[in-house]
Image (tube, helix red, strand yellow):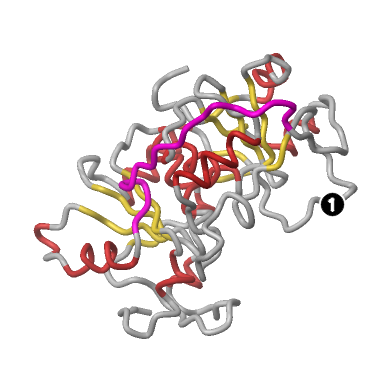
Amino acid sequence: MQANCSLVSVSWLASHYTDPDIIVLDASMVSTHESTAAYIPGSQAFDYAKVFCDRSATLPCTMPSDNTFTEQARLLGINQHSTVIVYDQRGLFFAPRAWWMFKAMGLQKVYVLAGGMPKWQAQNLPTTTQLETASTAGDFTAVFDSGCFVNSADVLTVIQSPIETASSTVIDVRSADRFYGRELETRPGLRSGHIPHSINFPFSEIVTDGELISSQALKQQFAKWMPYRDQQYIFSCGSGVTACITLMAAWELGYTTLAVYDGSWTDWGADANLPIEV
């Protein structure tokens, strides 16, 4: 696989999911997995809402410490040499967040299943109604790259820099209605609008039927909204989940200086001391 590849196909996984070094994770963000849900055989749950998170944080899905990530990853049987494949029940929605978390913690061989569970089922491949647990602990040790995630103070520094010398850009992947404050936020206490000087590039413009649009179409979209490859791009959304979809697409196209605003609008929109635009 290429160095900047973040995706594997259903056909590839169908041939490899039983390999001993392959760890398959369902990264769907649900509080409890429904008894009627279908999974790829051998799948384990990757829960970044309640397990792989900072449980002391007031914001949802906040990145955990190296130690917490190491402990929980080992319980999934993940080793330093493991190849991890993450997927979700919606096709392409939750899994990129898990992929970026593993990248940030130093696991190199981690990929997202293109099309996720819907595409797996569409090809009549084997499924099960039960998630698994690892029989033996792994030896993976997480080493957090702090450049992969930023906070509100980092974002504030970026937007307060003179535009003519700015080396970072904030990309907001929420819908245009939320970005421009035409749609009220569903979380209590959140203001409507967007981070000043941020660019609205909705993730929905690059996803169709649970997969990224074609490579050529992606290049056209990114040339429009993210033309400067030497810049840092900080991706923001509602809570730091769908931001990873657009970040992953940027990774596929060879962008290298990428980060997620952990907390995103749930953090920014709730802090009356931070500036907003509508």
Q: Name which residue lies at 43% across and 77% down.
A: 269
Residue 213 place in picture, x, y as percent: 53, 39
Q: Name which residue lies at 52% across and 39% down.
A: 70
Residue 277 place in picture, x, y as percent: 34, 78
In what element is the residue under mark 1?
A: loop
Residue 25 place in picture, x, y as percent: 67, 36
Q: How crowded is mark 1: few (under 14 residues within 10 Å), some or many (20 or more)?
A: few
Residue 53 place in picture, x, y as percent: 55, 54
Position of 21 with respect to 267 (left or right) is right
What residue is disc 1 on?
34
270 up-or-down from 201: above or below: below
Q: Residue 265's image quarter?
A: bottom left
197 up-or-down from 113: above or below: below
Position of 32 with respect to 163 (left or right) is right
Q: Does the magenta stretch include residue 135?
A: yes
Observer-nearest of 232 and 57 = 57
Region rendered in magenta: 134-150
Q: Name which residue lies at 43% across and 75% down.
A: 180
Secondary structure mostly seen in magenta is loop
Q: Residue 38's image quarter?
A: top right
Question: What amino acid is found at the position of numbered circle 1 in the picture?
Answer: Glu
User: Could you tell me how many numbered marks the image carries?
Assistant: 1
Where, quadrant-wise, is the C terminus in this rendering?
bottom left
Q: Is residue 61 magenta?
A: no
Observer-nearest of 117 and 104 = 104
Q: Residue 135's image quarter?
A: top right
